[in-house]
Amino acid sequence: MKRFILNEAPDKNGAVRLEGDDYHYLVRVRRLAAGEYFPALLPSGEEALIQVRSVEGGTLTGSVKPDDTARGLSGAAANVSVILFQALPKGEKMDVIVRQAAEGALAEIVPFIAEFSIPKIKGDGERGRHSSGAGAKKNSRWERIIKEARQQSGSPVATVVRPPESMDGLFAYWEELKRERPKILGLLFHHLPLAHLPLHSYLAGDPETVVLAVGPEGGFSPAEVSRFLAAGFKAVTIGDTILRTETAALYATAAIRIILLERNSWEIKINQAGNG
């Protein structure tokens, strides 16, 4: 279900006031009129139903329907957190990856510079080092893409794009995640048959966070593969075709999300087979 994302919380009386792009989207694109309702996500993460009171002078005013302010997102809270480590691709492909990741309810996207990445950043040994002007523009554009994707898909997850990392910075962040989240699983998606177990087997370990790493157009170098495996990532190969990097990110994300969403059904079958 589509949900509009409110950047500011309603006032103490439950009133909202929307102008500019938000007004254009709700009134011109979705053609909402006074008296109609639309579902929204509050900055707190709660769901709310907003009734449109007026759409005059380029301003939409509305109010939160009282019975819907405290429903929360209990379903989303139970989901496993999925993080994408994405090697920066060339051109505008990262925009596509960000949009698809937001639609797929990923928690974080961590761009990084791999050996075969065409975009480069200075200071390879430093965390998140990039041109401040270009980086600010990219982050602003990605934030806009995420908002549009979440409103279109209804994703309750506030997807975050981190600043681009060097390889050293990426593995430093991976170590931070491991310290903070003991039940974490790292998956390295690779076009060569390096995997020892199927994806279901890795996900059957009941992880609370899954981190998937996808390479650039040229794939990962042998040295990078060795480094990921030494850091605790598990190699996964899906299918027998070589995918574009933006397709691989979507493919891998979709596979993980579907398996996790259907976990109850396939875990029951595995348990029944084991007891039989």
Image: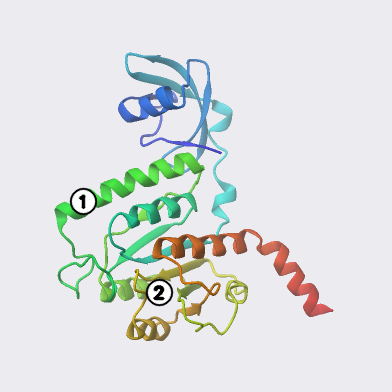
Quadrant of image for the N terminus: top right
- What amino acid is found at the position of numbered circle 2 in the picture? Arg
Above or below: residue 241 compared with residue 224: above
Q: Secondary structure at mark 2?
A: helix
Colouring used for the render: rainbow
Q: Secondary structure at mark 1?
A: helix
- Name the residue rendered at 34%, 19% in the picture: 59
Reading the image, the residue beneath label 1 is 136
Q: Position of residue 26 (x, y in %)?
A: 42, 26
- The crowd level at tag 1 (other Cα within 10 Å; few <14, some 14-19, many 20+) is few
Above or below: residue 154 compared with residue 127: above
Q: Residue furthest right?
A: 276
Q: Along the horizontal axis of the image, is 272 left or right of 192?
A: right
Reading the image, the residue beneath label 2 is 179
The mark nearer the N terminus, 2 or 1, is 1
Q: Residue furthest front?
A: 241
Q: Position of residue 184 (x, y in %)?
A: 49, 72
Q: Quadrant of residue 224?
A: bottom left
- Name the residue rendered at 51%, 82% in the picture: 193
- What amino acid is found at the position of numbered circle 1 in the picture? Ala
Mark 2 and mark 1: Cα distance apart in space: 29 Å
Q: Is residue 180 visible?
A: no
| 2 vs 1, front mark | 1
Quadrant of image for the C terminus: bottom right
- Name the residue rendered at 49%, 79% in the picture: 234
Task: Report the number of numbered marks.
Answer: 2
Q: Position of residue 178 (x, y in %)?
A: 42, 74
The answer to whether the residue labelled 2 contacts the one labelled 1, judged by CB atoms less than 8 Å apart, is: no
